[in-house]
Amino acid sequence: MLRFLPGHFNLAAGAYGDRALSLRDYKFVKGASDGKLRYQPKQRIEFYNFLIDTIRNFDKDVSISLCRETPEIWNNFKDHCEPKKCNCVVW
């Protein structure tokens, strides 16, 4: 999960036990508009780079959008999406 509410940690701990404890090692940042916790921007950018490359290996024309992401993240990836195909309101 790239974003979650603080209470989601308890759900993860219930489902995954001690493995969920590793989530506490990350320095999450609180989302300005929705209050959800997110990985640092650098980590999200690395993940999205990997994910977009993987998707494009299978289908170069599929629509990709990063809904609910911050403008900072969108600025890094707006060239990977066609605004007319994107369902995000940031455009």
Image (cartoon, rainbow, N blue to C red):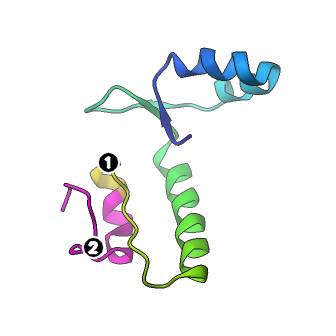
Return the disc, 1 or 2, that comes first in the chain's sequence: 1
> Residue 85: which disc?
2
Residue 25 sits inside the magenta stretch: no
Residue 77 sits inside the magenta stretch: yes
The quarter holding residue 24 reads top right
Dot 2: what SS? loop
Bin the neighbour count of mark 2 within 10 Å (Cα to Cα): few under 14, some 14-19, many 20 and up: few
Taking the view exactly as shown, the residue that stands out farthest to the right is 18
Q: Position of residue 56 (x, y in %)?
A: 54, 79
CA separation, marks 1 and 2? 19 Å
Left or right placement of residue 71 versus residue 41 in this view: left
Q: Position of residue 42 (x, y in %)?
A: 51, 52
Tag 1: residue type?
Answer: Thr
Left or right placement of residue 32 versus residue 51 in this view: left
Q: To which residue does mark 1 refer?
A: 70
Q: Nearer the viewer, residue 27 or 22?
A: 22
Q: Residue at x 81, y 20 (%)?
A: 18
**Residue range of the region highlighted in magenta in the rendering:** 74-91
Indicate whether 61 appears above or below 7.
Answer: below
